[in-house]
Amino acid sequence: MKIEAKNKSSSKIPTASIADIVFLLLIFFMSVTVFKQYQGLRVELPAAKATKKIERKRMITHIWIDAQNHINIDDMMVNLEQVTPILKKKMIENPATIVSIRADARSKYGVVARLLEKLKDANALRVNFATLSKG
Amino acid sequence: MALKIQKKQHYKKEAEIPTASLADIVFLLLIFFLVTTSMNPDKGLGITLPPPGEQARISKEKVLSIYINAEGKVLIGEEIVPLDQLEDKIKAKLKEKKNNLVKKGVRNPDPIVSLITDVEARYSAMVDVLDKIKLAFEELKKEDPKFKEILSLATPVF
């Protein structure tokens, strides 16, 4: 006697909705991604416990200061005198600019202090010292 | 002849857009965005600088001065404070100042922290202390939500 399965159910994974799911993910990543515009300098950031996220990602201007106290804005090596005009221009373009200072832990505070003076002159008053979170 | 043409039109193809490869294309885009997205957000310690040219006069009793010398040693008032005791010390001093100011009936009795750093000090020394000040303010705000965080980075004269 032959035993036959009465109704074979076809085993298939429904793939029709995969595209929709992936689209959703894609849209999420597209909206979240902010492309890194500038390379910057190689710095070792200091760590701090009170580190907070900056909310408005797209309004940030980065200024790098490396251990040899070189200053770099938007991949341009600048000296202190050039900082004010560059920042003034940025403040006109976007008055809500936040300046994130990515200074090396080994750099001298004097350079940062001078830079802060120049930022003040350019009316760029919202400043953030980039740090790594600790603890 | 006429008969033949009629027969050909019988096989009408349904108009369809091939969507089988759509998932592949979207996957490819997804992987691209996954790879390029940097998940380490910008973070740090935020401060607001005073507007240029503004030199407000502040009564001395409001100000808590914290000094950092070239070696990274921290001085509050007259004593050198090690880094691990700094947060509690700042907290205690700020509370004391606030109480004194309230007792005296001063307007805006919010103490001001002034951080004065030697230009020869390492940047990390200043960030360490700034961190402690921020933590102290956070703690005080938890106890009293009306506690204002006022911080000034004193600028050395060049």
Image: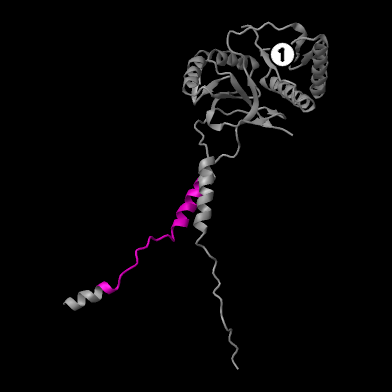
Quarter that holds the N terminus of chain B: bottom left
Front position in the image: B82 or B106: B106
* Image side of residue B130 versus residue A60, left or right: right
Front position in the image: A47 or B7: B7
Residue B94 painted magenta: no
**As drawn, B15 above or below B90:** below
The quadrant where residue B151 appears = top right
The quadrant where residue A101 appears = top right
Callout 1 secondary element: strand
Q: Residue at x 58, y 11 (%)?
A: B52
The reply to whether residue A68 is in sight is no
Figure label count: 1
The quadrant where residue B122 appears = top right
Q: Residue at x 82, y 9 (%)?
A: B104
List x then y, in percent, for residue A1.
60, 94
Front position in the image: B19 or A46: B19
**As drawn, B139 above or below A30:** above
List x then y, in percent, for residue A58.
53, 31
Which residue is denoted by mark 1 in the rendering? B114
Q: Which stretch is magenta? A: B9-32
The amino acid on which the numbered mark 1 sits, given as a three-letter code, is Ser
**How are the residues colored?**
one colour
Of all residues, the one furthest to the bottom in this rendering is A1
* Image side of residue B15 versus residue B101, left or right: left
Q: Residue at x 52, y 53 (%)?
A: A22
Residue B30 painted magenta: yes
Dot 1: few (<14), some (14–19), or many (≥20) neighbours within 10 Å? some
